[in-house]
Amino acid sequence: CPDGTAGAMICVRAFAVVGMDVELEPIQYDEPAHNELEPAPGQLFVDITPPVHRWREWEEFDPIVLDHHSTARKAVEGLGGVYGDSNQSGASLAYEHVMLPLIMSLPKSSLAAGDWSPYTTWWKEFARMAMLRDTWKEDHEEFEKAQGMMRCLGFHGSKNLIRDCRNGLIDIEGMFGLGKKLHDNAVRKAELLARGAHFETVELGTRTFKFGILNCTDNVVSEACHSLLNDHGCDLAASFFYKEDDGDGRLHVSLRSQQHEKGEGGEVDVSKVAEILEGGGRQSTAGFRLCEARNKSMQDLADMISDAFRSVMRK
């Protein structure tokens, strides 16, 4: 995700400045590479943790763990890591707990006076933009700027950006113009997709909730979900797409709720919905994957999510 890419860029640049050569291994939650990860000395986890069901295997190795996903909180705190609140993301944690301490540990003579500024201004701003987008602070005056910046990361490709970060600063400021165009296009696509969504009413006693779900054929899953929330009045939104992962056809599902508008601790905790379906995330943004899901219809998927939602709301 963009926040994970931004966190990796921050870490790679910080270690390069202090002369440390580190091996970077991009991993996503619950993929085979993550589930099969083995504990070892000298590991740093950013925007992810060791497999949650196996975190105790890492205790003797004392890894550094920085994450903000509520479904991974037990692993973060169990390993003495830093668990981010609703105003933090993987990138902001990487800046605060990796880049800033490393840069500040250098002798003042090791960097020219003009070289200090980017690490206390530019990279800090970069991390803040990643946080605004990842935590979806859509009421913030700079939210669209953050959206554009993070969409640029996908446009340029994480591997290229991380490689360039080893060698020097990247002109993210120069990406803002392009980022706005990319973001505007994404919003238009998402709004169009949302108009063709399937809507259901989920009844729980005397309460009713509007649920919208769509097949997202483009890389606009977050924007599409939030169009369902903001433009169509949904309490719960889901978007999905198919992707080949390690030779298996998987269904990737994103879940969003109205909590961005209602504040932390609002009505629908989608991380708990995702957890029932063997996924995870945060209160207002979460997701899960289904293997061998090519025979799943949209109605099958809607029923799975609705059943999990009912289970969460009845507790």
Image (spheres, rainbow, N blue to C red):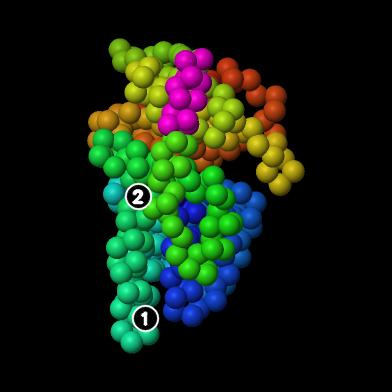
Q: Amino acid at mark 1?
A: Leu
- Asked whether residue 255 appears in the rendered view, the answer is no
Q: Residue at x 25, y 31 (%)?
A: 262
Number of disc labels: 2
Tag 1's secondary structure? loop
- Residue placed most toward the observer, 235 or 105: 105
Give the label on residue 129, or none: 2
Q: Residue at x 49, y 54 (%)?
A: 5
Q: Position of residue 3 (x, y in %)?
A: 44, 50
Q: Amino acid at mark 2?
A: Met
In this rendering, is residue 264 above or below 94?
above
Q: Position of residue 37 (x, y in %)?
A: 61, 61
The span picked out in magenta is 184-196
Circle 2 packing at 10 Å, graded few (<14), some (14-19), many (20+), is many
**188 magenta-colored:** yes
Camera-side mark, 1 or 2: 1
In this rendering, is residue 12 above or below 152?
below
Residue 119: image quadrant is bottom left
Give the label on residue 235, or none: none
- According to the picture, the residue beneath numbered tag 1 turns out to be 111
Residue 296: image quadrant is top right
Between marks 1 and 2, how big is the CA–CA gap? 26 Å
In this rendering, is residue 147 above or below 208?
below
Sequence-wise, the earlier of marks 1 and 2 is 1
Circle 1 packing at 10 Å, graded few (<14), some (14-19), many (20+), is few
- Asked whether residue 35 appears in the rendered view, the answer is yes
Q: Residue at x 29, y 63 (%)?
A: 121
- Residue placed most toward the observer, 210 or 185: 185
